Image (tube, grey):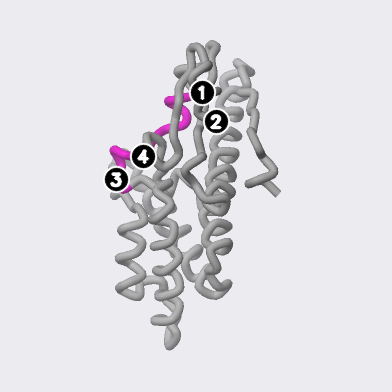
Amino acid sequence: GGDAAALVIGGVHLEAGGNFRLGVRQFGLAPLMTLLQRYGLPEVSALHLENRLARLWEEAEAMERNGRAAPYIGLEQLIQMAEENEFGGGSSATVINHAIRSRLEALKNTHIFARSASEAASLGKAYRQVRAGGALVIDMSSLSNLAREGFVQAIIAMVKDLCIWEIEHDTHRFPFIFFEEAHLYVS
C-alpha cells in the first residue's frame, strides 16, 4: 500500500496511470493483444489489428535504425485509424474496426498509456536510478484488475529486457521482483 512506499529509503516511486504511463510500442504487442482480448476483442478483429501493428512497428524500427525519428503512435492515433477503417476487413471492415475502436477506448480509460512521446516513462531509466541499491516501487492501486494484468505482463517483458542488458554487458546485476497481492492480477 501507500504506507509501505513511504518507508522505502533510496527509492523511486512510480504510479501506474499517474507519473508512470507507457507508450503503446513500449507496452509490447503480445501484452497489448492479451489485454485487448481480455476486454473482449473478437479474434478476427484481433488478427487484423495485430498484423497492422506488427507492420507499423517494423516500419518505425527501420526508421530508427536509419537514424530517423519514428512518429509517435499512441492510443489516440490507433483510435483515429480505426475510425478511418484502416485495420482492413474487406466487406466487414466497419464491424472489425468498430470492435477495435471500442476496446481501444476502454484501454484509454485505464490511463496506463502515454498520450505523447514525452509522457511515456522509461522503466530502464527509473531502474538505473536504483540499480546500485534501492527500491523501485510501482503502485498499481488505481488500476482495475483487468488493467493490472496487462500492465504486469508488459512490465515483466521490460524486466526481461533489463536482464538481457545485464547479461550482454556481463554485469549480472539482476533486479529482484516482489509482487504484492499477486493472486489478484497474475494467474
Q: Amino acid at mark 4?
A: Ala
Residue 122 within the segment the image draws in magenta: yes
Residue 31 at what x, y percent from top left? 55, 51
Q: Amino acid at mark 1?
A: Ala
- Is residue 81 toward the left or the right of residue 155 in the image? left
Q: CA distance from mark 1 to mark 2?
A: 7 Å
Answer yes or no: do the residues labelled 4 and 2 have beta carbons within 8 Å? Answer: no
Q: Regarding mark 4 in the picture, which secondary structure is present there?
A: loop
Of 50 and 101, the residue lying toward us: 101
User: Looking at the rendering, which quadrant does residue 135 occupy?
Assistant: top right
Image: magenta residue range: 115-126
Residue 7 within the segment the image draws in magenta: no
**In the rendered image, the vertical position of residue 135 relative to residue 95, given as above or below:** above
Q: Amino acid at mark 2?
A: Gly
User: Looking at the rendering, which quadrant does residue 20 occupy?
Assistant: top left
Answer yes or no: do the residues labelled 3 and 2 have beta carbons within 8 Å? Answer: no
Residue picked out by circle 1: 5
Residue picked out by circle 2: 1
- Per the rendering, the mark at residue 120 is 4
Answer yes or no: do the residues labelled 1 and 2 have beta carbons within 8 Å? Answer: yes
Q: Residues within 10 Å of mark 2 (few under 14, many from 20)?
A: few
Q: Residues within 10 Å of mark 3 (few under 14, many from 20)?
A: some
User: Marks 3 and 2: which is nearer the front?
Assistant: 2
Q: CA distance from mark 4 to mark 1?
A: 22 Å
User: Marks 4 and 2: which is nearer the front?
Assistant: 2
Answer yes or no: do the residues labelled 4 and 1 have beta carbons within 8 Å? Answer: no
Q: Regarding mark 3 in the picture, which secondary structure is present there?
A: loop
Label located before the other in sequence (4 or 1): 1
